[in-house]
């Protein structure tokens, strides 16, 4: 398109550049709710702060939006003429003034951090603030979180947890609904997993006997001793071999932290098929030497 046709098009346009500039004077369309902007505080008063964000009129930051923590002196958190980041929390009013927040921006950053921690299967410390039928409410970096009763280690006396600091993992994070569900059991599992390795001899307590195997508690983490891994000899019924609460030593043969799975074997400790059934105490007493021998045995 040549310059002649360009100018004739502009001349015929019902909406000129001048009109556009006038429209912009009325409304600064570059600023919208939810947007992060840079600006400088140029005036403080009892109700809040006035901020220059480069618009046609100044922006306003209410006192209770200055910071997540309680503030007595605004100048502590809003130094004058220093470039800071702000979140627009309310669109322009009739005077073209937008409302800003530093507090909501801090909260956004916290959600981002928590999501990153969840992705990396990290754990975090929280303080128990309250108790209800379903579990406990906690404070996490000024956000309110919840730990369901089934995900607590202490499930009977929840009142005793008030004021305590717990190590937790993340079950569910949803910033749109402000949902933050945490788990103490997940954190225990995660920290315990880092102590485990294949071929390691562990000691635990039998917590459940099923037709397919027995569940063993390893310091708060559940492991499975499958029926086929109990002995080199065929077993008809595990209930005839084991009982709940019984202590047992076994070797870790499989680890899957993602699924929270630990697989055990006692069959590996036997000197002959069925030894664990015939002389359980003897196998347990010399389990360490037997496990060392098993790990040094060349692969068949």
Image: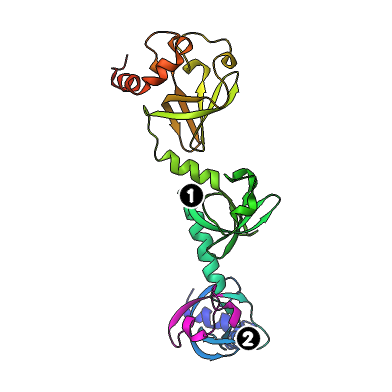
Q: Secondary structure at mark 2?
A: loop
Q: Is residue 89 above or below residue 223?
A: below
All told, the count of numbered labels is 2
Q: Position of residue 215 (x, y in %)?
A: 54, 27
Q: Is residue 248 above or below residue 34?
A: above
Q: Position of residue 293 (x, y in %)?
A: 30, 19
Q: Where is mark 2, residue-wise?
A: 96
- Point out the frontmost of discs 2 and 1: 1
Is residue 52 visible in the rendered image? The answer is: no
Quadrant of the image containing the C terminus: top left
Q: For residue 193, what is the image quadrant?
A: top left
Q: Is residue 58 above or below residue 167?
A: below
Q: Residue at x 60, y 18 (%)?
A: 211
Q: Where is mark 1, residue-wise?
A: 119
Q: Residue at x 37, y 29 (%)?
A: 200
Q: Is residue 130 above or below residue 249?
A: below
Within the magenta stretch, is there residue 75?
Answer: yes
Q: For residue 290, what is the image quadrant?
A: top left
Give the Cα separation between the discs numbered 2 and 1.
41 Å
Q: Residue at x 53, y 57 (%)?
A: 126
Is residue 254 visible in the rendered image? The answer is: yes
Q: Secondary structure at mark 1?
A: helix
What coloring was used for the rendering?
rainbow
Within the magenta stretch, is there residue 291?
Answer: no
Q: Position of residue 232 (x, y in %)?
A: 44, 11
Q: What span is in magenta? A: 63-87
Give the class, few, some or many, for how many residues have Cα within 10 Å of label 1's Cα (few <14, many ≥20). few
Task: Return the residue nearer the eye: 255 or 24.
Answer: 255
């Amino acid at each position: 398109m040549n310059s002649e046709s360009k100018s004739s098009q502009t001349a015929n346009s019902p909406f000129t550049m001048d009109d556009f500039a006038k429209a912009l004077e009325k409304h600064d369309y570059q600023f919208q709710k939810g947007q992060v902007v840079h600006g400088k505080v140029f005036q403080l008063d009892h109700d809040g702060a006035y901020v220059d964000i480069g618009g046609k009129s100044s922006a306003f930051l209410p006192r209770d939006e200055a910071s997540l923590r309680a503030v007595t002196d605004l100048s502590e958190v809003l130094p004058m003429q220093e470039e800071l980041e702000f979140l627009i929390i309310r669109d322009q009013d009739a005077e073209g003034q937008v409302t800003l927040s530093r507090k909501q921006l801090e909260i956004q950053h916290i959600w981002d951090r928590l999501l990153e921690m969840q992705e990396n299967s990290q754990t975090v410390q929280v303080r128990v603030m309250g108790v209800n039928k379903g579990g406990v409410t906690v404070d996490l970096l000024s956000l309110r979180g919840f730990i369901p009763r089934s995900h607590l280690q202490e499930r009977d006396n929840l009142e005793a947890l008030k004021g305590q600091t717990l190590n937790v993992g993340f079950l569910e994070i949803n910033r749109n609904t402000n949902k933050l569900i945490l788990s103490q059991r997940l954190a225990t599992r995660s920290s315990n997993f880092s102590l485990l390795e294949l071929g390691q001899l562990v000691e635990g307590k039998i917590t459940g006997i099923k037709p397919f195997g027995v569940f063993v508690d390893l310091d708060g983490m559940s492991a499975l001793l499958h029926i086929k891994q109990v002995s080199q000899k065929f077993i008809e019924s595990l209930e005839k071999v084991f009982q709940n609460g019984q202590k047992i030593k076994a070797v870790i043969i499989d680890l899957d932290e993602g699924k929270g799975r630990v697989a055990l074997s006692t069959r590996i400790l036997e000197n002959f098929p069925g030894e664990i059934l015939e002389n359980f105490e003897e196998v347990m007493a010399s389990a360490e030497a037997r496990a060392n021998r098993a790990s040094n045995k060349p692969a068949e």
